[in-house]
Image: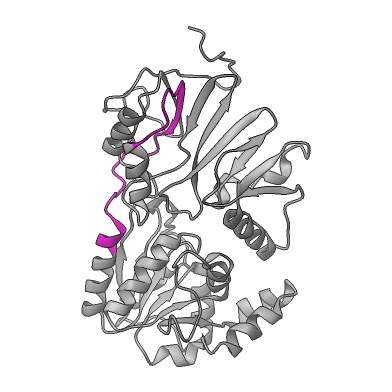
Amino acid sequence: MIFSHPHMDHWGMVNELPHSWPLWTGKKSAALMQLTLGIFGERIISDINTWHSRETAFAVGRFKVTPFLTDHSALDAYMLLIERDGVRILYTGDFRMHGRKSVLVERFMKRPPKDIDVLLMEGTNLRSNKPVMSEADLEGHFAALANEVAGHIFVDWSAQNFDRTVTLYRAALKSERDLVVDLYTADALMQIANGTGLPRPSREDFASLKVVITPKMKRLYARMGRSGFVDQIISAGVATSRKRVSGNPAFIMARNSLVSDYEAGGDLAMTANDCFVHSSWSGYLDEENEQSGWVIAGEVGARRELIHTSGHASASDLSRFAEAVAPKWLVPVHGVEWDNPGIDLPPLKRLSDGETWKIGAQ
């Protein structure tokens, strides 16, 4: 059985799997996976089995699985308790404790499942210097930046990092600006916002959220056979254009593909009065790409900033979590510093690729 969550780096090769393998994920994750592949003219071949965020235990063959909604930069991420024949395995997946859903992890740690035989725990941030400030702190940084920048604040962030979308929307409200997103970001919000409290394109409920319709994205949705979605955005009164946005300083979604559309149109070309913010992992910043927003901002004399926080738990939070769960064994996944983690951890069981380990055997 394969479990997934919506970041594409976790499921991008899902169609390479044998079709006989059951595929499971949260309902909102499934919607985002289908939407993202649709952008590329593809689809998931296998059927997707789903659970709801408030789901209790369910059976997958002879396994009993209990999902626990957790805090991560990706929406609809879960920890999983997997049980069979008296053996209990807890898999953390990617998680953190400094996002907008950190209370979920704190509650879990106060009453963790008992008698865990194996904790499968990620360790992406072991011995790393990745920023782990809270989304609330980032919100303050963006709001302060808006007071210092006369022009637009172009922000490059993942449309599927919904915590960051909320952070930017709240910063926009504080600074009396609009948050301008593209059709794909608007589509993702509308797919999953119901029941979450997330902002979504709505003139009545989220008046400061606007959707810019660029020629390139409009053509893309036409090729997908979804021109009706563009019409829906227009009829809802939340659509805007590059020209209309240009006269009102705003926070603007600025993936590289969008920046080229802004520059081509002229109305939203960056100037020295603007600021460009890279709000993703620094490893995604390509300073050699002449068509990137970062490079273009430098060429025109715009201010440039790195404002981001990791989607993964800090080393100290990993230690706290492992202590709270108190497993018999900890099997590490993700991360490269497990030989010298620099934190207190339960007994480690290192497994090589393809190595078989019978749980309970020494």
Q: Among all residues in the image, which is located at the extreme top?
A: 362
Please determine whether, in this image, residue 347 is positioned above or below residue 314: above
Q: Nearer the viewer, residue 235 or 27?
A: 27
Residue in the image at 55% along x and 30% along y = 82
Q: Quadrant of residue 101?
A: bottom left
Q: Is residue 121 magenta?
A: yes
Does the rendering let one see residue 9?
yes
Q: Nearer the viewer, residue 195 or 243?
A: 195
**Magenta stretch in the rendered image:** 111-138
Relative image position of residue 216 (x, y in whole percent): 62, 78
Residue 89 appears left or right of 163: right
Residue 337 appears left or right of 21: left
Q: Is residue 109 magenta?
A: no
Q: Main secondary structure of the magenta part?
A: loop
Residue in the image at 30% along x and 41% along y = 314
Residue in the image at 45% along x and 37% along y = 92
